[in-house]
Image (cartoon, coloured by chain):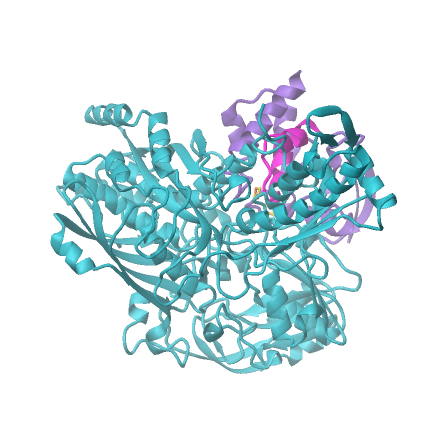
Chain colours: A purple, B cyan
Amino acid sequence: MTNINFVVNGIRHQLAVKDNETLLDVLRDRLGLTGAKKGCDIGECGTCTVVVDGEPILSCITLAVEMEGKRITTIEGLAQNGELHPLQKAFHEHGAVQCGFCTPGMIMSGKALLDKNPKPTEQEVRRAISGNSCRCTGYDKPVKAILAAAEAEIQ
Amino acid sequence: MSEFAILGKPTPRVDGIPKVTGKAQYAADLSVAGMLYGEVLRSPYPHARILSIDTSRAERLPGVRGVITGKDFNGFRHGFMAHTRDESPLAPDKVRFIGDEVAAVAAIDPDIAHEAVELIRVEYEQLPAVFDPEEAMQEGAPAIHDHVQRNISAEMHFNFGDVEAAFARADHVREDRFYSQSVLHGFLEPHACIAQYEEPGKITFWGSKQSPYFPYRNLASAFKVPLSNVRVIQPVVGGGFGGKNDTFALDYAAVMLSKKTGHPVKFVYDIEDVLMAGRRRHPMIIYMKTGVKKDGTLLATECRVIADGGAYTAVGPMTIYLAGAFLTLPYKLPNLKYDAWRVYTNKPVSVAQRGHGVPQTRFAADCQLDLIAKDLGLDPVEIRLKNAIEPGHVTVNKIHISSCGLKETINRSTEFVNWKERKQELAKEREKGGRYLRGIGLACNGFMSGARLHGHTACAVVVKVHEDGTVSVLPGATDSGQGAETVLATMAAEVLGITLEDVHVSRVDSFLTPVDPGSYGSRVTSTAGPALLIAVGKCRTQLAEVAAKLLDAPVAEIEFRERKAFVKGDPTKQMPFGKLCRLAYQYGSGQVIIGEGYFGQNVALPNWDTGEGDVANAYTFGTQVAEVEVDRETGQVKLKKMIVAHDLGKMFNPLIVEGQHDGSIYGGMGQALYEECLNEDGLTLNPSILDYKMPTALDMPGVMESINIETNDPLGPFGAKESAEGTQVSTVPAIVNAIYDATGIMFTDLPITPEKVLRALEQKEQGGGPIVPASI
Ligand code: FES
Ligand code: FES
């Protein structure tokens, strides 16, 4: 067990975690943040993507002990004061969501992209979500949604 | 202005906000106080007799609360039909594929459950195994099920017209062999459930199920309790595509372990469970013989299918039924002989998958049609238009077509790409040589809208209007991601003149929602839809009667729109919908505004033995045009464009319909070019998403266009038909035909990997035939 201090969605946490505990399990089972999904648990599907200090990371292959001093944003932390984040709004309005299982991870990949590159090209968007599998949408509408969110944020 | 307020508009889905905010609760997100965690033990052998199972060490591990084996189920078996019940929740005496479930444990945490499973000792006697369906059906092949001759799990033999006479009359006859491989459903949410068993015999079950009334019935039979004791509560479902219909080992084991331990038990499969041992699409070897007249008119098809069923029968008889019955769509085919065998092998089980059996034979038939067109010097579009089914057509196996926009889908999709010019342009480009070969191809589909089966066909919807003017819809149907909730909410809102925000669609809770067969066979819009219209129509009538009194007008004059009740032609007489509802409750006769409706089966059911009759209420038709680019150096094929033209009866919501088409393109492209469950001696060699090669966002075509044609089906709600599955039927052949145009090589063996392309191009350069041998 190791004690870690970290901030999740603006809230400071101090937790004793097992050395083999993943960030995904800590988020889902200890903090009740089940928005990040466990599609594969081996770093291949992207459904567990969260943003750590500005970088998109796969929380299923990240150990919780490495989170000391980090700032983590999950899908639950995107909407502010009841207002959807532009990416959430765009995913909803552009029909980028079907079963929704990939959606939190895909939105978080989109968020990390737009934070660094507010005006990405379509190809840059596709690359940014190329680690996020989705069986339902064929990626077309998610790509359009991320481009639309970028547009909306600039205005 | 459209006559509809919501219908036909690109309205966001009703379940969108919980999904984009991470609040939607899937099965694995749920917990119940006191729950234990389960895990299953799987067979390491493809075929073996279980001699003994020693669970004592597992039971002694601290934290373990229960261990069960196949014996706990007392010989219970499940299956699609009474005579095909060949699958046990946990294998009691024999394992039949690597991954077959043998035992299960429940413990206070998942790590202990995992450790306990590894402490179970099973003594096996290995048996000879068989993996190839054609070998499995030989005399003397190892018997996978003791009572079954030649490992035939199911067979279908249809004979319509006189194929022999037609072949004798034909100007041209061709025979080809095709192979459609094993592919996964690909949903990202692994199977998960929680079950709670309370004495005396009450079961509560939360599971990721696209057809929750399947486990409702299966669990009642397995545990010998009345149906009404089984409460199935449906969480949000993370995709199904046909892979979340059946009741699986984890579902039964969760209930049994809960019964044994007195605690709720949760199971979450991991991705390896799904990829190694989970269900998949039927691989099929397809022998097609087709005869035509000189002008391309189809005369007869003789089709033989050998479907690799894997270890158990499951829904397999239906699969090979549909694969044959749909050979008479979407082209007029006056003579058909069909013989199909679904064969057991020592591999994971094959079941329904988006398009259910039809994509496999349509791939063979539509690709062979391009070969025939080439033989006769006809254009692929011309030969399709010549044979295309038209409204009012009755197929030789008595499928009655009412609405049909096939010709329009062919015309619109090919016009969109300027077919003739584009084809010539690409041919010229190829003549110049160069690294890339580009080509264009098309294929058509006909599919069922609202599958009708024997047995459990009851399907109803209840609608409650609340005093505040909002509405609850209680369907038995399920949204597994396809948009069913939004479709039902749209219909209810449209009839009552309210908005989508005013309508709440409940998920299945078998205590409260009415029964429904499930979300398969493109059923929801076509069967739950009409049931809903009856239910909401009853509410509307009741409200109109109250409004007529309050507004002093005849009932027939009352209209509902913009959240108001109006009197036709008199704008001064109106009332807010919410107020009307309140008054109906408070000043009425004690009346409560509730309506219920069920879907009536109005045509005769199909005949399983002969292959004759209607399998659905209506049929959809479509055409896809694909443009591909083949890299001569790497052998890689890139899908550049895909145009979908689909006769959906009536457009409900372009966002949802386009999304469904995109998903079908994705699945079909994966099957055509990338995906395959590789299996060696029963072992899945690529049980990971990366090795399995699900396409990524970078692999998708830049152009995916969807053209929708409204034909207003007489039985469809508002004239609508399915738009979720039919498209996947023609995606594969459209791509394969485009590759044929690009390379002159018809790839009859899926998937079309770079290795196969390079080898075929090489063979062609050395003067080999135009067709790659079907099995490499
Ligand atoms: S769950 Fe982390 S990548 Fe799949
Ligand atoms: S929306 Fe279902 S996996 Fe992406």
- Point out residue A154 in the picture as x, y percentages from the top left corner: 65, 17
Q: Quadrant of residue B233?
A: bottom right
Q: Which quadrant of the figure shows ligand 2?
A: top right
Q: Quadrant of residue A52?
A: top right
Q: Is residue B340 visible?
A: yes
In the displayed structure, B31 sits above or below B705; it is: below
- Point out residue B684 in the picture as x, y percentages from the top left corner: 44, 59
Position of B741 with respect to B470 (left or right) is left
Position of A106 with respect to B432 (left or right) is right
* Magenta-span inclusion, residue B522: no
- Point out residue B89 in the picture as x, y percentages from the top left corner: 56, 72
- Point out residue B202 in the picture as x, y percentages from the top left corner: 73, 71
Closer to the camera in the image, B77 or A123: B77
Q: Residue at x 34, y 41 (%)?
A: B390
Residue stretch rendered in magenta on the structure: A84-110
In the displayed structure, B550 sits above or below B772; it is: above
Q: Is residue B670 visible?
A: no
Q: Residue at x 71, y 29 (%)?
A: B562
